[in-house]
Amino acid sequence: MTTKHLHPLTLILMVWKNLVNIVLFTLIMFGVIKELHRWQYLMILSGIVSLAIILAVVKYWWFTYELDDQAITIHSGVIFRQQIHIPYNRIQTLQLKQWFYMKPFKVLAVSIETAGQSNSKAEGQLPVVSKRVVDQLQNRVNGQPNDQGVPDTPATSGTIYHIDWTDLNLYALTSLGILPLMVALGWLYNNLDNIIPKKWLQSVFSRAEHLNIIFLISAILGILIIGMLTSYLIIIQRYYHFQLTKQDNQLLTEKGFFQHNTITASLNRIQAVVIEQTIIRQWLKLASVQVILASSAADKEDQNNLVMMPVISQRHYEQIQPFIQWLPSVEPTYIRISKKAKWLLIRNAVVLAAIPVVALGYFFRPWGWLGLLLLPVAVGLGSYAGHNMGIAILSRHLLSTQDGHFFKRSTYLIPKRRIQAMTIAQSIWMKRTQLAHLRLQLRHGDSSQQVEVRYLPIQVAQSLYQWYVNPS
Amino acid sequence: MEKGQALPAKIKTVWRVSAGCSLLVGLVVTGGLIAATKWWQWSPVFWLICAGLTVLDVAIELALIPYRYRFWRYQISTQEVEIESGFFFHQQTAIPINRIQNVTLEAGPILQWQQLQTVSIETAATSHKIKSVLPETASQLKQQIMALAMEATPYDN
């Protein structure tokens, strides 16, 4: 196979990028040198533009790639030559991105991720290649049977899930709130001491100040509404026409309006499945399903998990099971923790919250005592955590845990062979109450993730430990 | 508790020596601060705090040696490596052999002088240390783990 260059459209993108980079620099320079004639300006300008073009051409010329039978090789760099060699069967995920302006040219951006522990950047990146090359690459990746890994049952091809508009709407609406609210509150807080103690109290009866307050409130509302609307639109844009397909041993998600985003992940590489529900979605009986992979391909916004289904109704197991066969088809029943354990979780949350509350109250009298309002929140957090903590052995190969952090419930479904290590932790005080924490270590993205079930009865923890240690 | 194997007794010497090193470093820093107090009229508070911290650190380090030695066990069976530690905060960890990705043997100068080695066991997600073993045990262990890892059904990461 011969070496290839990227699609020529790359040149335009590179020139554009270079110009943006250089222009910032030049603007600073122009600020310094003021005494210049028009022709001198033009000279410098054309110099910059040609520099950008030359740099782009050089970079383009030196960037080549090869698709062999076994691996893809990418050569890049001008002064420091770099050669990346990725065997197809090592590819964990393949991500394709297509911005709207790339569509008419039938070109895509490709990121190739392996399980290698490099930094957050994808191991292989092809900024602009034509659709034909992408198809070729995909065929080679799919055609390569995974040399290790379990042989899957013959896949019922054509399992498809589409998001519908009501679901997407609900998803966007229920992910709203906290962030724009925080921004608005932060702004309010910054301006609070300017307005409330001094001016407001002094001139409650002054009309002008009244107007000021009205203006202020409407400004806050305005910011809130705009913030919510943008975050709503961003989510709609991101998950526009979301679609999940199962092809042979691959999961394929497609989504996006301005940027069409396709991620292919091998089913054999799934470390665990996470079902997440914020308390609002719990009330509305909605859940979002994510997959933990051993590469960081997926969105940074979703803690590097691959979103499998942004939102589905409560009876989600029936819907997920066709895609991942080892999942249960009904909701598991969990072993819940005892009353005593729930009380301990509440105590911990309150003690943790009490430290800043006391400090606030002491140093910022009298307003600091408003911090006391945190205590009921802490009680709520603790009892929520206690209510949702649970664990279940589903089979000799499958485990499920549940926990609740910050009013969000996460349900993990973990195959035994993906648990890298298991720890029982028990402090001397817990010996008396016969309780213990159980910690599981998983591979997550480029690093690890710990799943912890707290204050389990020691017998339950030990039986799980035995389940884990016993060969099967 | 107490089923596995304890660390070699020599490790106590190593810990004492390393406490001695901490003392030395602390003394040097304190000496510097005393000099600064003398020549540049720094407040004596600095060297007093530094000296206090040094003494405290060394005392705690020395005091903890029997505890650390007593409550730290490891066990290697055909299926897994188990590590147990702590009395006040007791922890028991199991690492199945077929999850192990690689094994590293290390030894700093003090460990080398005592002819000991640290074994660190790495999985795809975590890293676990057996603080010190005799060199024979270390290489034996390494071979055992590698052999078992070869035998055990490999799972793709």
Image: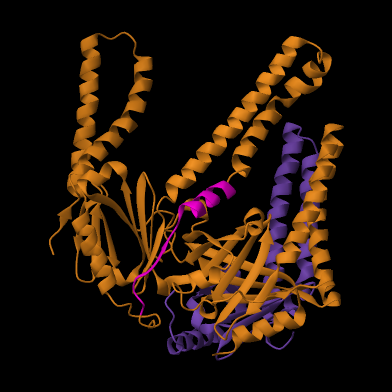
Q: Quadrant of residue A339 in the image?
A: bottom right
| Residue A175 appears in view | no
Foreground residue among B153 and A345: A345
| Residue A235 appears in view | yes
The residue stretch that appears in magenta: A155-174
Quadrant holding the C terminus of chain A:
bottom right
Which residue is outermost to the left? A2
Q: Residue drawn at (75%, 24%), measured in percent from left and top? A: A193
Q: Residue drawn at (51%, 37%), measured in percent from left and top? A: A230
Q: Residue drawn at (82%, 76%), measured in percent from left and top? A: A431
The chain assigned the colour purple in the figure is: B
Foreground residue among A257 and B153: A257
Whether the magenta-drawn stretch holds residue A165 is answered as: yes
Q: Position of residue B35 (x, y in %)?
A: 73, 40
* Vertical order, B55 against A320 (above or below): above
Q: Say left or right for A245 vs A402.
A: left
Q: Quadrant of residue A187 in the image?
A: top right
Q: Colour of chain A?
A: orange
Q: Say left or right for A297 vs A344.
A: left
Q: Say left or right for A28 vs A319.
A: left
Foreground residue among A189 and A219: A219
Q: Residue drawn at (73%, 21%), measured in percent from left and top? A: A194
Q: Position of residue A242 (x, y in %)?
A: 41, 56
Q: Position of residue A342 (x, y in %)?
A: 80, 66
Q: Position of residue A231 (x, y in %)?
A: 52, 41
Quadrant holding the N terminus of chain A:
bottom left
**Number of marks present in the image shown:** 0
* Vertical order, B63 against A221 (above or below): below
| Visual colour scheme | by chain
